[in-house]
Amino acid sequence: MSLLFSPLRIKNIDLKNRIVVSPMCQYSADEGYANDWHLVHLGSRAVGGAGLILLEATAVSPEGRISAEDLGIWSDDHIPVLKRITAFLHANGSVAGIQLGHAGRKGSSGSPWKGGKKVSEANGGWKTVAPSAVPFQESDEAPAALTAEGIEKVRTDFKAAARRALDAGFKVIEIHAAHGYLLHQFLSPLSNQRSDAYGGSFENRIRLVLEVVDDIKEVWPEENPLFVRISASDWADGGWTADESIALSSILKDKGVDLIDCSSGGLAAHQQIPIFPGYQVQFSEDIKKQAGILTGAVGLITDAEQAESILTEGKADLIFLARELLRDPYFPLHAAQILNEDIKWPDQYDRAKPRKSK
């Protein structure tokens, strides 16, 4: 059996294969509520055979949204429609997970097809928050530096969101500490210029991430997996580094985190990223081997053979696919054919399954 289609047990969940639908914002919610678009979008990937499906970055508070169209989980009222989605995903053989996030200074933005620019408070936006009053773009209004009370609210919001995620039927939580959003902003010296217990040293800059992990573990069952997505490098001088990512991952493992989802970038507007197929896989390999924790590889992974080789070479434990699964919701079914794996298709589609001639 190919490794891509081998099962993997993480705590109390059994993944039927190593293919993960990476969190991808759809910018299609209203006041945080999921709707039929999310059900069909995510449901298609379950029908398509993915082992684990992670919902897009779901805001733990209204001010934590990237855009006004982001999914939210700051209210118990958000639970019923999310529960409908998780039930469908589980009924069709996938495990449902959710990424919990707070956009910080990158919030109050327009959806990509509306230009993605900052939306002013006068036009329906909101005042953003961050570790320090340092904007992402020099032309942006500076965010408000979080006070001690503001940091406490962030922690409380993540904890409450985790409880709601459990009530909504999710089996996996991924904490979003990547792509220049709030928790990543605390990690990086480029955005964190604080002089208190949350700024300066490596130990101080990672403090909020560790506190959020502890807070979530108070309400998230010990037997349920907990992932953390990080940007393993800022790709910018003076920013968060790959070595710091390895050190953080070791600490997170000791705290009971099960897997590091290894992405990169997103914090500095002047970042310089060398783009090529699998350009982030090295981070996954280094963290897996040096921190001794399960990792997920993501970034320009586009075909079955590439995904299989990453696993067989010991560079990752899971393959997170994003744009390729937007292009082809049935990538797992097609990849199985390429790797000569005979996997089950949905009963409703079985008559279309290619079969080898005898």
Image: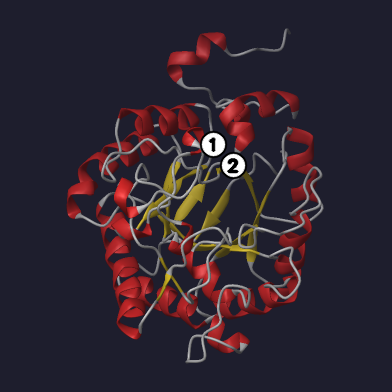
Q: Position of residue 94 (x, y in %)?
A: 46, 39
Q: Looking at the picture, which amino acid does disc 2 mark?
A: Asn
Secondary structure at numbered mark 1: loop
- Callouts 2 and 1 close, C-beta under 8 Å: yes
Name the one closer to the observer, 343 or 252: 252
Distance between mark 2 and mark 1 Cα atoms: 7 Å
The answer to which quarter of the image holds residue 229 is bottom right
Vertical arrangement, residue 335 with respect to residue 173, above or below = above
The image quadrant of residue 213 is bottom left
* Nearer-the-camera pick, 250 or 124: 124
Is residue 232 visible to us here?
yes
The residue under label 2 is: 17
Quarter of the picture holding the N terminus:
top right
Tell me: 274 left or right of 41.
Answer: right
As displayed, is residue 55 above or below residue 231?
Answer: above
Name the residue at 35% across, 62% down.
127
Q: Residues within 10 Å of mark 2 (few under 14, many from 20)?
A: many
Question: Which one is closest to the eye, mark 2 or mark 1?
Answer: 1
Q: Amino acid at mark 1?
A: Ala
Q: Could you tell me which residue is drawn at 54 percent across and 87 percent down?
A: 204
The residue located at (53%, 31%) in the rendering is 49
Q: Nearer the viewer, residue 175 or 132?
A: 132
| Place of residue 262 in the rendered image (x, y in percent of width and height, measured from the top left) | 65, 59
Sequence-wise, which precedes: disc 2 or disc 1? Answer: 2
Q: Quadrant of the C terminus?
A: top right
The colour scheme used to paint the residues is secondary structure
Q: Residue at x 31, y 69 (%)?
A: 159
Task: Please state the horizontal and vertical placement of residue 45, each as a whole percent of the image.
Answer: 49, 31
Q: Is residue 264 visible?
A: no
What residue does disc 1 label? 50
